[in-house]
Image (cartoon, rainbow, N blue to C red):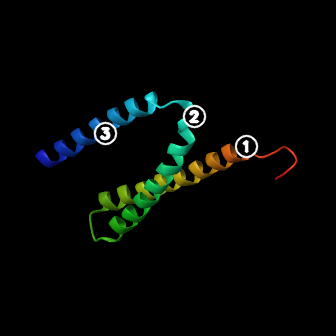
Amino acid sequence: MDFYFLMIFIFVIAALLGFELITKVPPTLHTPLMSGSNAISGITIVGAIMAAQENQTVFAQIIAFLAVALATINVIGGYMVTDRMLGSFKKKGKK
């Protein structure tokens, strides 16, 4: 029971800290930071796939599947936003 309480506590603190940090970032730095977060999400995908491989409970398998799905959505969305931002710097006549 104490282990789960500690994990929930760490998750809540990380969420609050992440929210505070993101709100303090100026808009000009959002896209470079998103590119970095894509790399981290790629690592999350690998870790979640490895976790899903283990013979664990059904609950753990569901959580691992959700982690893979959400990290994949994050990576794809991040690349789409980064590509759109980089496209805004191209000259009008070129693609």
Give me the residue at 37% from left, 59% from top.
64
Q: In this figure, which residue is indicated by the disc labeled 3?
A: 14
Q: Residue at x 73, y 43 (%)?
A: 89
User: Given contact means CB atoms under 8 Å apart, are the residues at marks 1 and 2 in contact?
Assistant: no
- Against 50, residue 70 (above or below) is above
Numbered disc in front, either 2 or 3: 2
The picture quadrant where one finds residue 9 is top left
The front one of 55 and 13 is 13
Along the line of sight, which residue is nearer the eye, 81 or 85? Answer: 85
Q: Amino acid at mark 2?
A: Thr
Which SS class for mark 3? helix
Badge 3 crowding class, 10 Å Cα cut-off, few under 14, some 14 to 19, many 20 or more, is few
Between the residue at mark 1 and the residue at mark 3, the CA separation in whole angstroms equals 34 Å
Residue 29 visible in image: yes
Residue 28 is labelled as: 2
Badge 1 marks a residue whose secondary structure is: loop
Residue at image position (33%, 32%) is 16
**Residue in view at x 27 percent, y 36 percent:** 13
The quadrant where residue 27 appears = top right
**Residue where numbered disc 1 is placed:** 89
Task: Kindly identify the amino acid type of the residue bearing the numbered disc 1.
Answer: Phe
Amino acid tagged 3: Ala
Distance between mark 1 and mark 2 Cα atoms: 13 Å
